[in-house]
Amino acid sequence: MDLSYDEIVGKFEKYVFQTYTRQPLAIKKARGAVVTDVNGMEYIDCVAGIAVNNVGHCHPAVVDAIKRQAEQLIHVSNLYFTEQQAVLAEELAHLTETDRVFFCNSGAEAVEGALKLARKASGKKRFIAAEHAFHGRTRGALSVTHKEKYRKPFEPLAPAVFVPYNDADAIRGAINDDTAGVILEPIQGEGGVIIPSDGYLNEVREICDETGTLLIIDEVQTGFGRTGKWFAREHSGIRADIMTVAKAMGGGFPMGAMLAREDVAANFGRGDHASTFGGNALSCAAAIANIEVIKKEGLVKRSEEMGKYLVQRLKGLHKDYVKEIRGRGLMVGMELTVKCDDIVNKARERGVLLNCTSDSVLRFVPPLTIAKEQLDKAVAVLDEI
Ligand SMILES: *Cc1c(COP(=O)(O)O)cnc(C)c1O
């Protein structure tokens, strides 16, 4: 099968739901931080499948684990036990400082599980979320996602209130007798790489403890080394009552999980939640290999170092168009004084893939394995543009 760009796009236009604004680029293969299109042109990838390919595209250890597992056992459902899910559950509970894991297949599904668990555990209905929050597109996750355009056509959704990010008092004021939980990203991703101010998450943690409110930390985008820690909550040293992970979990393989403290997890009994594919042998084997690579190659530390390097290089760019550069590890946002679509197009034409979020924020979430020279090239292209 070797379709041309036009043949591929023709089929998309005819047969695929038109829900995405896609770049005019059909990708054939990828390795490390480089992707190759169907015409053989190569691009330095500063998007990494939206913070997914943290270990780089097609990491040999992940590919090998998938191949070996696929030959032995792909899927049996959660009617049975598998070694892969057992091993991964233990590893994840340790890494996240939680006690129990529920496996699923995506970020939104992890958030659905978290909201259901908080409702059951609290016996209450209403959630508090942050302005500009993004937690996914299924109906529960959408009810705590802030953007009006995403929500409006699907109302009524589950009850939620939105308060400004970085305002702990607003959360205190919003908690009432019907509050099931507070859900926050430890760094807002889709909202424009918004970093919590010092002490914010600690204060929210204290408020939740004082009022007996569950704190859900959504680490779907910030997990697995992305921000220079295994999980971004570690920057403030707080623990979640419930946590969600996905994106980078499977080294590119679709995978998600919802995790919780023992006494919270205990509220989910047999039959309360389920997923046919959740934690199947193949996805768990991919995730185990992925975590091993992050450890072996020291990618958490590397994320911190390369993130600092990238921010420093971006700060050397022409300042007229730059409002602010912010980030932790290799999760970096460059907020511009102009919309960034045009820059994304021009960068792609010059062999660099960038992502634009919140209209005017260039979001850099490259593989944590990206070489200095590759980042230099991306910055040089930006400079030229
Ligand atoms: C991407 C994202 C989600 C949704 O994940 P999907 O896998 O696209 O459903 C949820 N929360 C956060 C913070 C995300 O960045």
Image: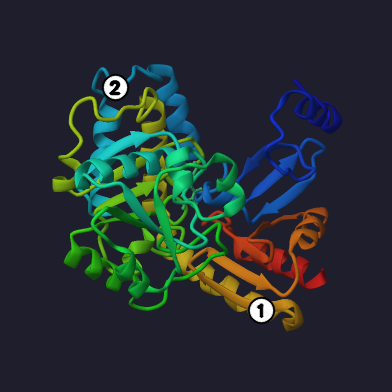
Identify the residue under disc 1.
323
Location of residue 155 in the rendering, given as x and y in whole percent from the top left corner: 52, 42
**Numbered circle sitting on residue 332:** none
Q: State the residue at coordinates (70%, 64%).
A: 378
Q: Amino acid at mark 2?
A: Asn
Location of residue 129 in the rendering, given as x and y in whole percent from the top left corner: 41, 58
Depth order, front residue of 143/285 = 143
Location of residue 384 in the rendering, given as x and y in whole percent from the top left corner: 82, 70
* Displayed quadrant of residue 29: top right
Q: State the residue at coordinates (35%, 30%).
A: 279
Q: CA distance from mark 1 to mark 2?
A: 49 Å
Circle 2 crowding by C-alpha within 10 Å: few under 14, some 14–19, many from 20: some
Q: Amino acid at mark 1?
A: Lys
Q: Tell me if I can see residue 32 in this picture.
A: no
In this rendering, the answer to whether 74 lies above or below 35 is above
Location of residue 72 in the rendering, given as x and y in whole percent from the top left corner: 38, 18
**Numbered circle sitting on residue 78:** 2
Tell me the element at label 1. strand
* Displayed quadrant of residue 128: bottom left
- In the shown orientation, is residue 371 left or right of residue 242? right
> Where the N terminus falls, by quadrant?
top right
Pointers 1 and 2 in contact (CB under 8 A)? no
Q: State the residue at coordinates (69%, 57%).
A: 354
Depth order, front residue of 162/250 = 162
- In the shown orientation, is residue 252 left or right of residue 198? right
Tell me the element at label 2. loop
In this rendering, the answer to whether 256 lies above or below 211 is above
- In the shown orientation, is residue 303 left or right of residue 117? right
- Point out the tag, 1 or 2, that comes first from the N-terminus: 2
